[in-house]
Image (spheres, grey):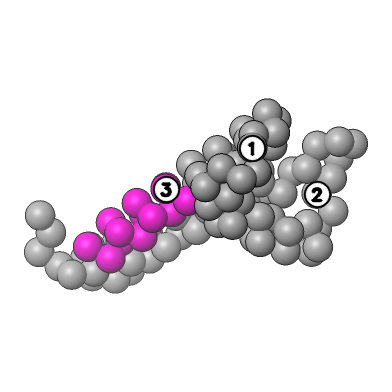
Amino acid sequence: MFENPLLYVAYAVDKLLTIYFWIIFVRALLSWVQPDPNNPLVRMVCKLVDPVTERISRIFPTKVGMVDLAPFVLMLTIMLLQAVLTWFILGAGTGIG
């Protein structure tokens, strides 16, 4: 598929960040419907997202009324990381950087 190993790394990083982006999105949706907290899927999603959003909330004031913008901030950060890291890795991998 790719001739340079760094391109595999860029592809993997891009896909992992995309998966994490969608996990954050699912967590935001779950906060609206209040699912069963004993559900294993709900617990896994919460364990993956909540520690990061709690850190963001400690650093920045993310509560606006009853809405917590920490997941949105995290999603924007993921998109920025995705763009910067893949650009950097692809630039290094192709010798353009």
* 28 w.r.t. 48: above or below: above
Q: Which mark is residue 19?
A: 3
Marks 1/3: CA–CA distance: 23 Å
**7 or 66, nearer to the observer:** 66
Marks 1/2: CA–CA distance: 25 Å
Query: What amino acid is found at the position of numbered circle 1 in the picture?
Result: Asp
Asked which quadrant contains residue 52, the reply is bottom right
Q: Position of residue 30 (x, y in %)?
A: 63, 35
Tell whether 27 sits left or right of 16: right
Look at the numbered disc 2 and give the secondary structure of its residue: loop
Q: Residue furthest front?
A: 38
Q: Nearer the viewer, mark 3 or mark 2?
A: 3
- Name the residue located 56 percent from the left edge and 42 percent from the top edge: 39
Asked which quadrant contains residue 96, the reply is bottom left
Most frequent secondary structure within the magenta stretch: helix
Membership of 17 in magenta stretch? yes
Tell whether 42 sits left or right of 33: left
**68 or 95, nearer to the observer:** 68
Kindly identify which residue carries mark 1: 36
Q: Position of residue 50 (x, y in %)?
A: 66, 55
Neighbours of disc 1 within 10 Å: few (<14), some (14-19), many (20+):
few
Residue 19 appears anywhere in the view: yes
Q: Which region shows up in magenta?
A: 8-20
* 57 w.r.t. 71: above or below: below
Q: Residue furthest top?
A: 33
